[in-house]
Amino acid sequence: MNAEQFSIIIHPILAVIGVFPLIGIVSYFAWETRQRRLAVKSGNKSAISPSVGKNHVQIGKILATAVIIVTLVGLFRPLMAKNIIENRLWETDTFQFIFILLMFLGAIATYILLYFAQTKLWRGIFATLSGMAIVILGCQDGIFRRTDEWYISHYYYGIAVSLLMIFSVAIINDIYRDKTNRWRNIHIIVNCIALLLFIGQGMTGARDLFEIALWTPPPAFLL
């Protein structure tokens, strides 16, 4: 494996080490939180600790952050290799070069601001800006998108799940303030969809490693 090939697998390495274990932990705490809530609602005493809900929220935020980081890393590598460096963008199109860098900085900055925002207005603004920056970066030349097969595209799954994670962070405060449970139900639906997308990413990501550049034909005597 050469340096270029290793740079390709940095994104999946981070996903396997940092994202997928957190998915399991968050899913477990989500199930425990729901079971405790149903038990309390029915008037029964639950053996599940009251802290399970807090743990679910905290690790859920960490998962969302990890997804955004892995997504940006996944976008950065092909943009750098297949667009900026290959086209010497800093010389041939300085505006585009600066624009891409600003989009990366904007995505990071607005997500951090979203993480700490308290009012509904600012959470909506920062979530929108962060999501827009990720979508715009994904539309740049150099990204392997498989648009003709979008329904089995690792790129589209990744962008969709990133937007869902941003949305989940944006509505956390509303979940606990809403007495009708509308936002809680939205949260459950959104994250069930995200879980299915994560499963799809595991399959499509492994496939795309071969198609993009990592796989090389075996020696002729093995064919």
Image (spheres, grey):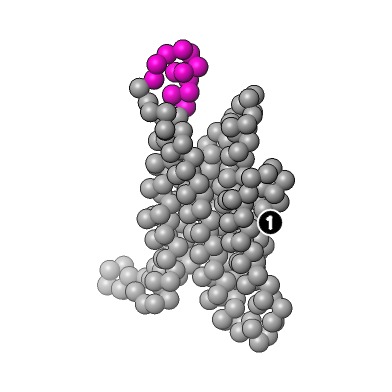
Point 68% across, 85% down: residue: 92
Q: Nearer the viewer, residue 1 or 85?
A: 85
Q: Residue furthest left?
A: 221
Classify residue 18 as left or right of residue 74: left
Q: Is residue 213 visible?
A: yes
Q: Is residue 109 magenta?
A: no
Residue 213, image quadrant:
bottom left
Q: Nearer the viewer, residue 59 or 97?
A: 59
Tell me the magenta residue range.
34-46
Question: Where does residue 2 sit, x and y in percent of width and height?
Answer: 37, 77
The answer to whether residue 186 is above or below residue 7 is above
Question: Where does residue 111 sit, x and y in percent of width and height?
Answer: 60, 56
The answer to whether residue 53 is above or below residue 83 is above
- Disc 1 residue type (three-letter): Leu
Q: Is residue 156 visible?
A: no
Question: Where does residue 172 sit, x and y in percent of width and height?
Answer: 58, 39
Question: Where does residue 24 sit, x and y in percent of width and height?
Answer: 39, 42
Q: Residues within 10 Å of mark 1 (few under 14, many from 20)?
A: some
